[in-house]
Image (tube, rainbow, N blue to C red):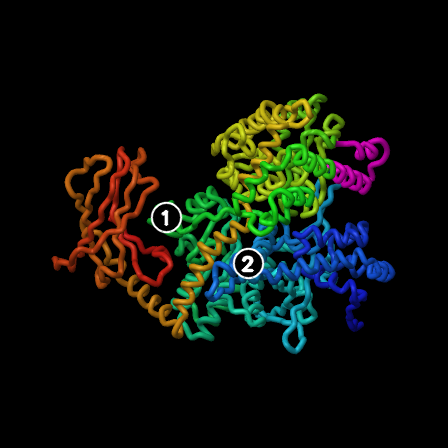
Amino acid sequence: MKIHPYFVRPQLPAPLEPLRELSQNCWFSWNWQVVQLFIRMDPVLWEQAYQNPVEMLARMPQARLEELAQDESFVANLNRVYGQFKDYLAQKTWFAREMAGGTAPRIAYFSCEYGIAEGLPIYSGGLGILSGDHLKSASDLGIPLVAVGLLYQEGYFRQYLNNDGWQQESYPENDWYNMPVRIERDTAGEPVRIQVAMDGETVHAQVWKAMVGRTPLFLLDTNIPENPLRLRAITRSLYGGDRERRIQQELLLGIGGRRALTALGIEPAVFHMNEGHSAFLALERMRILMQEKRLSFPEAIEVIWASSVFTTHTPVPAGNERFSMELMRKYVKPITDGLGIDWQGFVALGRVNAGDEREDFCLTVLALRLSALNNGVAKLHGKVSRAMWQGIWPGLPQEEVPIRSITNGIHTLTWISHDLRELLTLYLGPKLNEQPWDMSVWDRVDMIPDVEYWRTHQRRRERLVFFARKRLREQMERRGVRGEVLEQATSVLNPHALTLGFARRFATYKRCNLLFTDPDRLHRLLSNPERPVQIIFAGKAHPADQPGKEMIRTIVHYASEERFRPYIVFIEDYDINVARYLLQGTDVWINNPRRPLEASGTSGMKAAANGALNLSVLDGWWDEAFVPGRMSTGWAIGGGEEYEDTKHQDFVESHALYDVLEREVIPLFYDRDRTGLPREWIQRSKSCLRLLAPEFNTHRMLMDYTEQMYLPAARARLALTANNYEKARALAAWRAKVRSEWPKVAVAGVKIEGTNRVRSGDEISVDVEVRLGLLTPQDVTVQVYYGPLNSAGEIVNGVAQDSEFVETREAAGGAIHLFRARILCRDSGRRGYAARIIPRHPDQMHPFMGNTIVWE
């Protein structure tokens, strides 16, 4: 049977036509006034459509649309909101001001998932939510960024629990024709399609487009008739399938994503790989540079390296994407063979130990080797990443490994409640929307009367409690619960009680059940009638993560016990909607991962932006955000210790968690003045907004990326590609000369001026003699690396001081070149120094591209 598809669009009356454009741009996801329009049209249908305005318009009865078109008040409000949308698109932005008079480089951002709105479910958790927030802030700031991803027919799984508390998964299909995405078409009106060769077959993909404010997001979809069923399934689900499906998805994302941009006529200056999933992007960039621009493989590498930005999110080696050599030969070797690239040379780019045949190919390593600019997502995570990947740069001190830190943030206007936003706008003014990174804007939080501030938060807590009761009853009805137990669902939780929130991916290192280490103590803590406490949990475990599922089951079993039933609720199917209620209504946000395994932890930032206090292990963002003191923005579990004995760690930190709750959190919350207000709690809550909100937001994060990564990479690419890639070719030739001569490079001698005993404040001179083979003094930088010594005699937190070239003299065995450095001895104590040589070239981003460093 041959089916001929056709599409029926809703027939909007002319006065309502702006609704079509507003529904198709995800700007609605951070603008409450748009949401209010759709809620006003039909609040029940808004929820039934999963807060998806496109589907809502498709399902809206024509009679209701005609009625609204005659409603002068509604139409006036619609035109006002539509005018604000048009003004937003046209207004001058931060980036436009920064680049006044200059050429704006286009940035291509690649991520395997995006969490933008409830009605576009192509995300699983924190990585996707961060990617979505990244696009929103790029739009607000006017950064010329285009994003690339995959369009998953089933998205991530939907979670429900069986009668025994075990997580079950369902995979409903997404109807893209009723979601805020549209097929991208060429000038002839035909759908834009790209092809990628995989294992001797051609995979066809269709390009869809979602608009996130000003920022376009292009999504590839293989579920089209040109593909056989097994290939149509490549984009079926996020993080689903076996290893072969994963390599297919990641080849499509990297190679297909780059080809999609070409098909759309977009030529980015800089490519940002958000996690290693898109690292195969380098293969298509190599093809373009080698086949179309006629560069050699080394020359292409120079351009790719200088114009690539890579963000790593995973703080453990095992969590990074790896593929066996069998899969690599099957899917990748035909590509490298077609380009004439040496297979072993390419494989070495994806291994920490290039010559280790037993090591699988790691996409994170490939991305790190092919990106001049790399970063972790918090200060601590940057440090962890430098230690974890130091093997890629042998001989380089850990603190110099080229992985910097750019701490994550959140898109503030997406995550703060509309109640709080209205209150803040009243007292902080319009700059809350325009400059959320400005500390002086948030200083005005103290002007908000305590009674108004507390009333706003209480409303959000009440809404959270009512939402949790509703969801709990629905969950219990689906599981067949009846009678008194079902009726109790409508009275669990207390809208006035101290409410703790815990919601995230259920992975073992996050220790989601730590609070239940001592159930009896927990029950006493919750059930005090004078100072009641309650906890709301939510979160999913990966379908293959049995320990994570066991954690969920444990919590659900405790929540079902009669003694815990009034105080503990687990909400199924954690998503953006559930997250909003929790983050906006809880009083305390709990996070207790095993340090240092939490890369960032942006949920705590979202809670803080709503005035919740954090109670967390000093890991991820909290390690840099927490400041102890009477007006602190929260509490720490422990002092940043790291343990080898995990059982002992769980014992120590669970009791520390109980202690902080019993001795500090609960007493502070219930310490009320004669008007019934918890004055000190309110001051701490305001401190969250004043101190944390302007720092931990994606506007500040995107400004950091722009200034530290995007613009330097764009400038480097512009220089290398000018005059038919003249500098790229020269740089590759110079690097080949350096590699050839590097075995001859050595430190011949080091001499310090005077004695090895000096006084604080003195300056000492260090002479370093070196042999360079056929290299010249201009090809290298000779440095003296110095700093305090630890008990093992190693330099810690060292500083590299460049030396100046003095003279060259002939000697037996070749020329000796003398360099001299001067070191200022600022601090007293035991110190040490060492001489080293690194390559120098004015056109390289930094000297640590290869394993070229020589120590004395």
**Dot 1 amino acid type:** Glu
How would you rate the neighbour count of disc 1 (Cα within 10 Å): few for under 14, some for 14-19, many for 20 or more? some
Closest to the observer, 472 or 440: 440
The residue that label 1 is drawn on is 400
Question: How many marks on residues?
Answer: 2
Pointer 2 with pointer 1, Cβ within 8 A:
no
Query: Does residue 528 appear in this view?
Result: yes
Give the alpha-carbon distance from disc 2 to disc 1, as whole Å: 35 Å
Q: Residue at x 71, y 58 (%)?
A: 80
Which corner quadrant holds the N terminus? bottom right
Q: Position of residue 497 (x, y in %)?
A: 70, 29
The residue that label 2 is drawn on is 93
**Dot 2 amino acid type:** Thr
Membership of 469 in magenta stretch: yes
Is residue 411 positioned above or below 177 on the image?
above
Magenta residues span 465-493
Specify the principal SS of the magenta part: helix
